[in-house]
């Protein structure tokens, strides 16, 4: 996914836009919205906060 040809801005597909447009909805259908939210929102928020973990 790091190749220039993969980025939509350079005429490539699917690029990073694939993740929120296609992959996340598929993951939500397979696992449910709650586990996906925990992995993509809650865990990064917890890890990226300043202070004691």
Image (cartoon, rainbow, N blue to C red):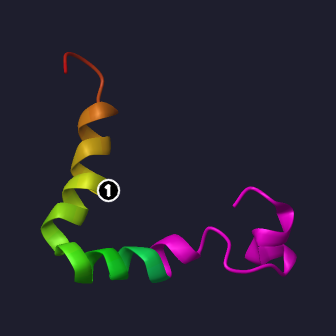
The residue nearer to you, when weighing 8 against 26, is 26
Residue 14 sits in quarter:
bottom right
Residue lying at 32% horizontally and 43% vertically, measured from the top left: 44
The residue nearer to you, when weighing 24 against 44, is 24
9 displayed left or right of 45: right
The residue nearer to you, when weighing 27 against 53, is 27
Seen in the picture, residue 47 relative to 37 is either above or below; the reply is: above
Residue 18 sits in quarter:
bottom right
Seen in the picture, residue 1 relative to 19 is either above or below; the reply is: above
Where does label 1 land, which residue?
40
Residue lying at 85% horizontally and 70% vertically, measured from the top left: 5
30 displayed left or right of 15: left
Residue 30 sits in quarter:
bottom left
Seen in the picture, residue 32 relative to 37 is either above or below; the reply is: below
Residue 31 percent across, percent down from the top left: 20, 73
Q: Which residue is outermost to the top?
A: 52
Seen in the picture, residue 48 relative to 45 is either above or below; the reply is: above
Range of magenta residues: 1-21
Q: Is residue 2 magenta?
A: yes
Q: Which residue is outermost to the front?
A: 30
């Amino acid at each position: 996914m790091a190749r220039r040809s993969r980025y939509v801005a350079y005429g490539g597909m699917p690029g990073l836009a694939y993740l929120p447009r296609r992959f996340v909805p598929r993951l939500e259908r397979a696992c449910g919205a709650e586990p996906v939210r925990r992995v993509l929102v809650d865990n990064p928020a917890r890890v990226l906060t300043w202070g004691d973990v």
